Amino acid sequence: MSSIPVVDQEACIGCEVCTQICPEVFRMEEVAGSGHGHDHKSVVYNPTGAPAKKIEEAMDNCPVACIYWS
Ligand code: SF4
């Protein structure tokens, strides 16, 4: 298993679904926003923190499908 999950932060809308499904892998971080202060985006802080199945569940439930394998 060499693939790791990646979040496309441009597309992430900060809904926190992935961090609720799979907090071992994803967490919310404050990133510089586009014009209005800061946005919250998901980041992969521990790519091997959960079984692939659980990570895939987070991917499947992301409303904008911006989590992918790399
Ligand atoms: S589920 Fe998708 S849109 Fe929601 S916080 Fe995670 S990566 Fe971002």
Image (cartoon, rainbow, N blue to C red):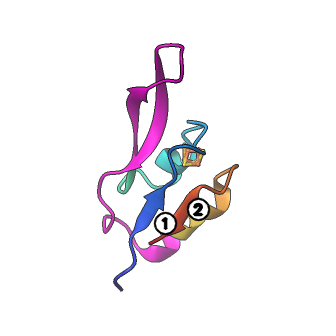
Q: Residue at x 30, y 52 (%)?
A: 45
Determine whether, in the image, residue 20 is placed left or right of residue 62.
left
Question: Which quarter of the picture shows residue 49?
Answer: bottom left
Question: Residue 18, how many percent across, how many down?
Answer: 53, 50
Q: From what the image shows, is residue 27 above or below residue 49?
A: above
Q: Residue at x 65, y 63 (%)?
A: 60
What is the distance, in whole Å, between disc 2 and disc 1 at their CAs?
6 Å
Q: Residue furthest right?
A: 63
Task: Please give the label number shown on residue 59.
Answer: 2
Q: Residue furthest top?
A: 36
Q: From what the image shows, is residue 34 above or below residue 18?
A: above
Question: Residue 5, how many percent across, how many down?
Answer: 43, 65
Tell me which segment is drawn in magenta.
27-54
Under circle 1, the secondary element is helix
Q: Quadrant of the C terminus?
A: bottom left
Q: Residue at x 55, y 59 (%)?
A: 67
User: Which residue type does callout 2 highlight?
Assistant: Met
Under circle 2, the secondary element is helix
Q: CB under 8 Å between callouts 2 and 1?
A: yes
Question: Which quarter of the picture shows residue 66?
Answer: bottom right
Q: Residue at x 49, y 25 (%)?
A: 39
Q: Quadrant of the N terminus?
A: bottom left
Q: Is residue 31 magenta?
A: yes
Question: Residue 4, how many percent across, how many down?
Answer: 38, 71
